[in-house]
Amino acid sequence: MNRRFFLTSGGIALASFGAMSVTPSFLRRALAEALEKMGRRKTLIAIFQRGAVDGLNMVVPFGESAYYDLRPNIAIRKPNGSADAAINLDGFFGLHPSMQSFKSLWDSKRLAIVHASGSPDNTRSHFDAQDYMESGTPGVKSTRDGWLNRYLQSKTDSRSLFRGVAMTQQMPRAMQGRAPAIAMSNLAEFRIRAGQTSASVQGGFEEIYDQAVNDSLHGTGKETFEAINYLKQVNPAQYKPENGATYPANGFGNALRQTAQLIKAGVGLEVAFTEVGGWDTHVNQGNQQGQLSNLLRNFSSAIAALHTDLGQRMDDVVILSMSEFGRTVRENGNRGTDHGHANAMFILGNSVRGGKVYGDWPGLRSSQLYEGRDLALTTDFRDVFGEVAQKHLGATNLNAVFPGYDASTSKFRGFLG
Amino acid sequence: MNQKKSGTHSTLLKRVTALTSALALLITSFAAVDGQSMKPRSTAKASKLSEDRRIVHVLNRLGFGARPGDVERVKAIGLDKYIEQQLNPDMIDDSATEAKLQHLTALRMTTPELYEKYPQPGQLLRALQQRGALPQDLAAARDNRRENRANNQNLKPGPPATAGGSDQPKTGEAKSGEMQGPPSNPANPNADANPMNNAEYRRAVYAYFKENNLRPPQFITGELQMSRILRATYSERQLQEVMVDFWTNHFNVFANKGADRWLLVSYDRDTIRPHTMGKFRDLLRATAESPAMLFYLDNFQSVSPNAQPQRPMVRQLARDRNLTMSNNPQDQMPQQTQGPRRGINENYARELMELHTLGVDGGYTQKDVQEVARCFTGWTIFAPRGAGAAAAQLTNAGGRRAERLRENAGKFYFNPRTHDDGEKIVLGHKIPAGGGAKDGLMVLEILAKHPATAKFIATKLARRFVSDEPPKSLVDRVAQTYTKTDGDIREMLRTIFLSPEFNSSAAYRAKIKRPFELAISAVRTLGGDTNGGPQFHQWIARMGQPLYGMQTPNGYSDVAEDWVNTGALLERMNFALALASNRIPGTRADLSRFVGDMAKDKTIDKEKLLDRFVTLIAGGEISAKTRESLLKQLNDQITVPAMPVVQTASLKIPGNPFEEGFQRGNFPGPGGGQQNPQQRRQQPANSNAATIDNPVVKIAGLLLGSPEFQRQ
């Protein structure tokens, strides 16, 4: 992989190893420093399970008899060594059987879980809950930017254009804000497409957007062309996953594959965002098999592939999954589950103290349920996000990332050293 | 724009252009943004718009932009009269547009007819088998496929989707296997893979469909999307099309959720269109009773838990009753394997208040959601998935069941047996026990009368027509109109259109066009033609707004910041280039008509040419600097662009690309005919994009992709 670095600071500066010989020495020094920093750059890959995954069938509390009482048709069997029962994690919790690819990650202590976590707000609206989780300010609608963007804002040491990339068609709420970030769904298609005249047509567009200084599209246009120019050098069409990793051939698999590609290209990626949907299982959710099973298989095998592909680079990468809320403990009349409260999150990486389910387990007896129906919350999602932002990404001011929240390290669960 | 006129008055035009350019600078600095925020500076003085600007403004906001000559036409009619006409679409003759839809036969079918003509192949095969009428070759092809699948239990690579998590379903149950494959084997990891990937099976199904004059269900959504594009492009009832878009989005339904593909034709034709400018309560009720919404938000299967005591015999009765609703094994399968469905589903109740009426801060509680859900139990759909209507018809099934199916499949009805008939309290109002279907109607009345609804609808309309963050003064007045007129939409619109806020320079070009608006306005501004077919729709999808492709019930966003990001902006520029260079099959823009008269001179006057396009595309309003850089692009030898290969005459009455593809053997659809967001970014639409060597084409493409043209 040819390692080139792209920096923007104030204006536009494009530099690569190849260009260094002709660069003035003071620039070279600054560049070297930046490169060193970027070489050590930590990356967070945030994965949003949109639609509210059923955390109780994803990370199964098989040690709870109430779980089986309340879910006569959709509960996951207790671990019994067979392939269609829960995968035993610690004698109380188990993984859904379709998440076999997570087993070795758990055993090698790279995968941690925080259960009964999520938003303290009691909304059961997908849109509100996603909004809160992405803005990082539960209960406050007026927050304009997302928590991942505020993290990017909080560190201004370098301005790689690719610090924040969402592998989505539209910029997700979590990444919206003042700090430059890019949304793209396909690296190879990210260019002006006009055959042999592409360069000159792009030049025309660049000038027009450059001059529209009073238009809000000016900045977006500028970022677009900077990104196009840089990606040309990364040569995305040539990518081959390493270590025998095979990503599922679908949108989510492709998004993770391209994330790996960006990380390996050394573009200075700090925060990557991907999403995967279909979790709103009101009807016929299935148990060991069925709808949710298929979704979880895809979810876990894609993440496992990313982990395999990145290999030793996982030293500097943390993968964090989230979903707007959990689902009702009791199954509904359609063998599905309705909108609930607390949920489970995965944290994966070589630096993660894995092999453990973190958090306090509130229990599933009716007196222990939130509003009499849902898994109660014992870990605020901001304590999980905050731990990742501070301990992994090196954020120094968590209050800026989570305004209005008393983000203190004492509340961290300790899944990062 | 009349070509001769603009030619002879070129000097004048140049001056006007220069003047307007200067003005544009002033205007844009008024509407300038602070930092990264998209909202216009609140300090901007709201000065009144000039008459010419007002016409452009009205054509942009009450419609999908001006075609050449529209400004002059409106001027001749008088702007106020034009607005009044648009507010009364039924008085406008639109037969020429309707004629363009004549080959889209699905649009005129009833829902049972759609079920008969466009069956889902897997479902059809099962229904035929049930009736002992499954042809042997078809059965063989299917069983062969099953075997292959059973032998390959790994996660089989699906269609080579490009990338992006966003093409995964956000919520809903698009991947539940309902559409994509037989749910008979939910354990199969490939259950959600497209069975049509198997060539032999596909051939056999195609042959059967052809022989029996059936068509794949994907065509329905395709034709519906075409109709929206054609109407937006050509209709004289521009405001009507804007309102169809507005309400379709407000009451969003996702085409790929289960049966909604079959139900959306009626939704557009019978639910949305007749009510766009009437009373809000009528529209609200129409959506509440629409099978499309009942299916989309799960209400059709919301059943009172108290409806049936849990004694085994009664349960058996309930099962039988369910069976009488539908004689299709697939429709019944869940009941058969799981017992009767019992349970309230809150989905519709919640979204009804949060998204359709009160707004999320409208003051309702979780308890209200539960109570409203109880009120709507029993509001359901007869044979919601068509119940093998096609098989019944193919086998000439007789009897009362078949008759009822023929008449009622996919229609709304109230089932008192599954209704919770107890007393409810909704937002403080008592709904007495025993009300039956009236419970739901009472809820709709309470919601339609609620001041939070007035405010919520007023805000959304003002956001659509004025600016992303509409002035509170205007929202308040529109909400007052709602209250005073019993929720009369036309009166609310009138309040907006006549308001100083709407007619102010702060509102002028303050909105960023969404992809649908951008695509349509680009064709209109060039005086182009389109068949509205899948290749055109695909561009709208690539830019982020596939029609009926929004999975979540909140609909597409109506504020700029959700549409302006690097990826989407790039697609907009690429769309502009594809359109200007005639690389979108079925869509033609003849640029030679704008240059033809100049070609008589030995050399084409660059400035004259540029001014003509700037006037045409950007209303003359680009900065002097932008003009300069565009002029540089004209340094090459200027030649008249070739006429598009396909003459626009063939687009006067567009054919049906789906039917044409089918006749050529394409199954289930032509090129991009799989109108399915999961697949919408499969083809790199123009990976071997044509070189743009004609400077005229280049200028048009650059202008259509410029910041100025993204605004309306």
Image (spheres, rainbow, N blue to C red):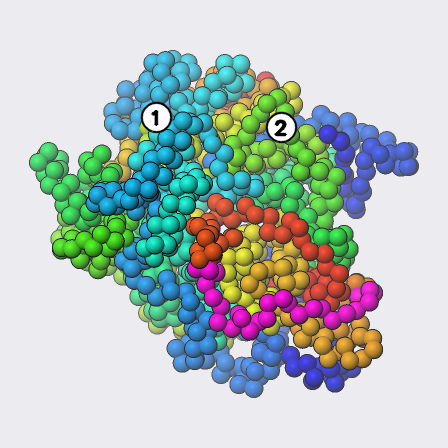
Query: Residue placed at 20% from the left, 48% from the top?
Result: B326
Horizontally, residue B331 falls left or right of residue B666, namely left
Q: What percent of the width, then of the height, locates residue A4?
A: 77, 34
Judging depth in this view, the residue of B611 and B201 nearest the camera is B201
Query: Residue placed at 28% from the left, 33% from the top?
Result: A331
Q: What percent of the width, then of the height, locates residue B295?
A: 31, 50
Residue A32 visible within the image: yes
Judging from the image, mark 1 belongs to the subunit labelled: A
Query: In the image as oriented, which residue stretches furthest toward the left?
Result: B313
Q: Residues within 10 Å of mark 1 (few under 14, many from 20)?
A: many
The first of marks 1 and 2 along the sequence is 2
- In which quadrant of the rendered view does residue B223 lie? bottom left
Residue B620 visible within the image: no
Query: Residue placed at 37% from the left, 54% from the top?
Result: B210
Amino acid type, callout 2: Pro
The verdict on residue B187 being magenta is: no
Horizontally, residue B431 falls left or right of residue B444, namely left
Identify the magenta region: B634-660
The verdict on residue B657 being magenta is: yes
Judging from the image, mark 2 belongs to the subunit labelled: A
Q: Residues within 10 Å of mark 2 (few under 14, many from 20)?
A: some
Q: Quadrant of the C terminus of chain B?
A: bottom right
A224 up-or-down from B56: above or below = above
Element type where label 2 sits in the image: loop
Residue A241, labelled with which disc?
2
Which residue is labeled 1 in the image? A288
Q: What percent of the width, then of the height, locates residue B62?
A: 51, 71
Question: What secondary structure characterizes most of the magenta part?
Answer: loop
Amino acid type, callout 1: Gln
Q: What percent of the width, then of the height, locates residue A392?
A: 62, 25
